[in-house]
Image (cartoon, helix red, strand yellow):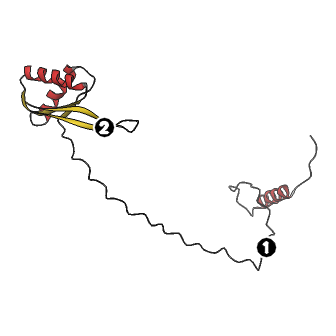
Amino acid sequence: MAKTSKTATTKRLLKQVKARSNGTTKKSEPLRPQAPPTTAKPKPDSKPAPKIAPKVVQKPDQPKPTPPPPPKPNNAVLVGRKTARCYAAAAWYAAQHDGRKAILRARGYAILTAIQATQICVEAGAKIEGTQLGIDRLVGQDGKPSNVSAIEIRLAW
């Protein structure tokens, strides 16, 4: 291994070791190389950076947001792709926990499954309080609006 010359950093470390052996520094302090002192002096003619006031951006008048739709009742069962028995059981469960009433809601091809689930519920002792047919207007991925049939069946036990 070649011998290297002592640099300013190693000289400072040697001073710290000597000071530690003399008892002028604490032994718990680790030996750390200190950064060399900077000799750069501030320029007397330099001015401090000007303070820039934050720009106030005025937002254009935005239309008031529409109020959120009313909350859905807890006893509503949304019918989808499962079997009719699953939705009949879900309607019965919802009716047991929410005042002996349940609502089956379906759109499109799921309307058939909702009707089958309603028939199962009627055979189990439920009564149909009412039905509501309608159309849900949806916007597709291509931006074209489309109408989808919807049904809501209210059951009571």
Q: Residue type at mark 1: give it.
A: Lys
* Disc 2 from disc 1: Cα separation: 70 Å
Label 1: few (<14), some (14–19) or many (≥20) C-alpha neighbours in 10 Å: few
Residue 40 shows in this picture: yes
Label 2: few (<14), some (14–19) or many (≥20) C-alpha neighbours in 10 Å: few
Q: Which residue is the site of mark 1?
A: 41
Q: Which residue is drawn at 70% across and 59% down?
A: 26
Q: Which residue is drawn at 16% across and 23% down?
A: 115
* First in residue order: circle 2 vs circle 1: 1
Q: Position of residue 102 (x, y in %)?
A: 13, 33
Mark 2 vs 1: CB contact within 8 A? no
Based on the displayed image, in which of its 4 quarters is residue 109 positioned? top left
Q: Which residue is the site of mark 2?
A: 138
The vertical placement of 134 against 65, above or below, is above
Q: Position of residue 128 (x, y in %)?
A: 7, 29
Residue in front for this viewpoint, 36 or 142 = 142
Q: Where is residue 105 in the image (x, y as percent from the top left)?
A: 20, 32
Based on the displayed image, in which of its 4 quarters is residue 95 positioned? top left
**Relative horizontal placement of residue 33, taking residue 119 as reference (left or right):** right
Residue in front for this viewpoint, 57 or 40 = 57
- Viewer-nearest of discs 2 and 1: 2
Q: Which residue is drawn at 20% across and 22% down?
A: 112
Q: Is mark 1 on a helix, strand or loop?
A: loop
Q: Residue type at mark 2: give it.
A: Leu
Q: Where is residue 87 in the image (x, y as percent from the top left)?
A: 20, 25
Q: Is mark 2 on a helix, strand or loop?
A: strand
Q: Residue at x 69, y 56 (%)?
A: 29
Image quadrant holding the N terminus, namely top right
